Image: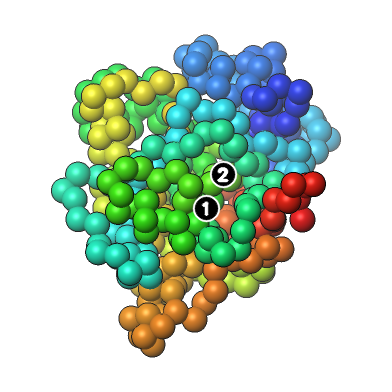
Amino acid sequence: MKLATYRSESRDGRLIVVSRNLQRAVDASDIAPDLLSALEHWEVAAPLLQQRYEALNADPPGAGFSFEVDSCAAPLPRPSQWIDGSDFPNHGHWVCKALGIPALASAAPLMYQGGTDDMRGATQDLILPDESLDIDLEGEVVAVLGDVPMGVSEEDATKHIKLLMLANDCSLRALQAQEMQSGFGMIRAKPSTSFSPVAVSLDEVKPWWIQNRLHRKMQVHRNGEWIGNPDASLMKRGFGPLIAHAAYTRRLRAGTLLGSGTVSGPDDFAGSAAIAEIRGMEIEKHGEARTPYLRFGERVRIEMLDDEGQSIFGAIDQRIARQFPGGVV
């Protein structure tokens, strides 16, 4: 099934069910008022949501109402927490090269706990204070978790994945090197994260869900120009070890989001899902970075397609905007 959240008077929005082709939708707030409530009562809510999804896809084209991406909040506007891994070693190598810092080396999964104060919808502006902070995009796959017990095994961990979605985990590279080397987590270098309009259940991606990772390529564009289609299957560990790592000393509450890290691979022809990677490669090849970071007014698009070229999660398609005291420009 495919689920989304329409903005409403509630900060948690209103839960809707979206058709497989992302054209139609029906209200689901009678089953659960919002996605977090559905996740907290998943055993009851999921079968009812699945029934409504099947009925929506079986009905004539006029069933429900037109799905409007611009009406979407993040699928989980207020998740229980946002934990981000870094499970693509190629990404870490080139970003460290771009930032001029030593490569991170750890036998354990790399992970930090991000902020959840201002999760952005797929077409909402990404609002930031200054271009000089070196604004970068980062395309990721995100697992939406149910309740996870403390000490869960790697083998059992993925049983707690209820949905998947995409993210633009924006980074401010001018602040990142300092925070990464401080020994504490990143705060200022990690502003609002943006998410695909739709979260999908694992059965929707069953042909491509292999070894606890998604075997699809991510399509990334900047101002309409292609910059990469890296393969999300190239995770080093997959989601099982990441979930088990996060739950080693505590349980994870339903509604936790866990990111894969920026999708990346060693194939130069696949491009990148982050500008810092491109700059790191340029430094290696030319002795200097040539590709600029994002500027105000530019647009970022992140998407994943099925075998027929149809969007699976819908697209993150957003503008980079500047925050002024009087508003946004």
Q: Quadrant of the C terminus?
A: bottom right
Q: Quadrant of the N terminus?
A: top right
Q: Is residue 44 above or below residue 7?
A: above
Query: From this viewpoint, is residue 286 visible?
Result: yes
Query: Residue sitting at 71 percent across and 21 percent down?
Result: 10
Few, some or many C-alpha atoms within 10 Å of disc 2 (few <14, some 14-19, many ≥20)?
A: some
Query: Residue sitting at 25 percent across and 35 percent down?
Result: 245
Q: Is residue 327 left or right of residue 239?
A: right
Front residue of 270 and 78 = 78
Q: Which mark is residue 9?
A: none
Q: Is residue 25 left or right of residue 285?
A: right
Q: Is residue 134 above or below residue 7?
A: below
Few, some or many C-alpha atoms within 10 Å of disc 1 (few <14, some 14-19, many ≥20)?
A: some
Q: Where is residue 179? Give x, y as percent.
A: 37, 51
Q: Which mark is residue 170?
A: 1
Q: Are marks 2 and 1 in contact (CB under 8 Å)?
A: yes
Residue farthest along the left direction in this orientation = 107
Q: Earlier in the sequence, mark 2 or mark 1?
A: 1
Query: Residue sitting at 30 percent across and 54 percent down?
Result: 181
Query: Residue sitting at 32 percent across and 20 percent down?
Result: 251
Under mark 1, the amino acid is Cys
Q: Which mark is residue 192?
A: 2
CA gap, disc 2 and disc 1: 7 Å
Quadrant of res 304: bottom right
Front residue of 204 and 222 = 222
Q: Where is residue 78? Give x, y as percent.
A: 57, 28
